[in-house]
Image (cartoon, helix red, strand yellow):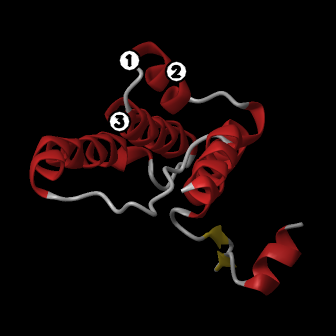
């Protein structure tokens, strides 16, 4: 396995590329969330019935995946606090974006496949 990773270039000088494990874990958690339906996004949307909660939930899910991935990846562990704080900071943009940016009518919120299916059906009826 290590030889394969070395040949592909994931391992250089006997060391896995810094951040490689982080990337694998982060995206794996996101994919796992889509397939299991475990979703902060869906939970918040159901609790509040609002798309802002959905956006917030999807963002927080990524911050949580960042946190878990950074803690697991030895090359990223020292950066965990910075990654999490950096991931939370853009959430402060949401009120500004809500007030000043017009959402695209054709935008499909990235969420659960049922939501996307429903969005697609709704779009075809307009």
**Residue bearing mark 2:** 43
Task: Answer left or right for 22 relative to 85.
Answer: right
- Say which element carries label 3: helix
Picture layout, residue 47 above or below residue 97: above
Do tag 1 and tag 3 residues touch (Cβ < 8 Å)?
Answer: no
Picture layout, residue 41 above or below residue 83: above
Point 52% across, 66% down: residue: 18
Picture layout, residue 53 above or below residue 8: above
Task: Answer left or right for 67 relative to 114.
Answer: left
Picture layout, residue 21 above or below residue 55: below
Point 34% across, 49% down: residue: 79
The first of marks 1 and 2 along the sequence is: 2
Residue 87: percent from the left, percent from the top? 30, 47
Q: Rounded to the nearest whole Å, what is the CA distance between mark 1 and mark 3? A: 11 Å
Do tag 1 and tag 2 residues touch (Cβ < 8 Å)?
Answer: no
Point 67% across, 50% down: residue: 121
Q: Rounded to the nearest whole Å, what is the CA distance between mark 1 and mark 2? A: 9 Å
Q: Residues within 10 Å of mark 2 (few under 14, many from 20)?
A: some
| Of the two numbered discs 1 and 3 in the rendering, the one whose residue sits closer to the viewer | 1
Judging depth in this view, the residue of 121 and 41 nearest the camera is 121
Judging depth in this view, the residue of 81 and 104 nearest the camera is 104
Q: Which mark is residue 48?
A: 1
- Say which element carries label 1: helix
Q: Residue furthest top?
A: 47
Point 32% across, 41% down: residue: 84
Residue 78: percent from the left, percent from the top? 36, 46
The first of marks 3 and 2 along the sequence is: 2
**Residue bearing mark 3:** 56
- Say which element carries label 2: helix
């Amino acid at each position: 396995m290590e030889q394969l990773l070395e040949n592909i270039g994931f391992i250089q000088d006997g060391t896995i590329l810094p951040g490689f494990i982080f990337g694998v874990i982060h995206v794996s958690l996101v994919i796992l969330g889509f397939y299991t339906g475990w979703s902060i996004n869906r939970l918040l949307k159901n609790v509040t019935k609002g798309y802002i909660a959905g956006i917030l939930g999807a963002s927080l899910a990524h911050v949580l995946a960042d946190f878990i991935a950074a803690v697991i990846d030895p090359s990223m562990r020292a950066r965990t606090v910075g990654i999490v704080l950096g991931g939370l900071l853009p959430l402060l943009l949401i009120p500004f974006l809500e007030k000043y940016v017009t959402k695209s009518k054709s935008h499909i919120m990235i969420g659960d496949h049922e939501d996307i299916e429903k969005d697609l059906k709704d779009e075809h009826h307009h």
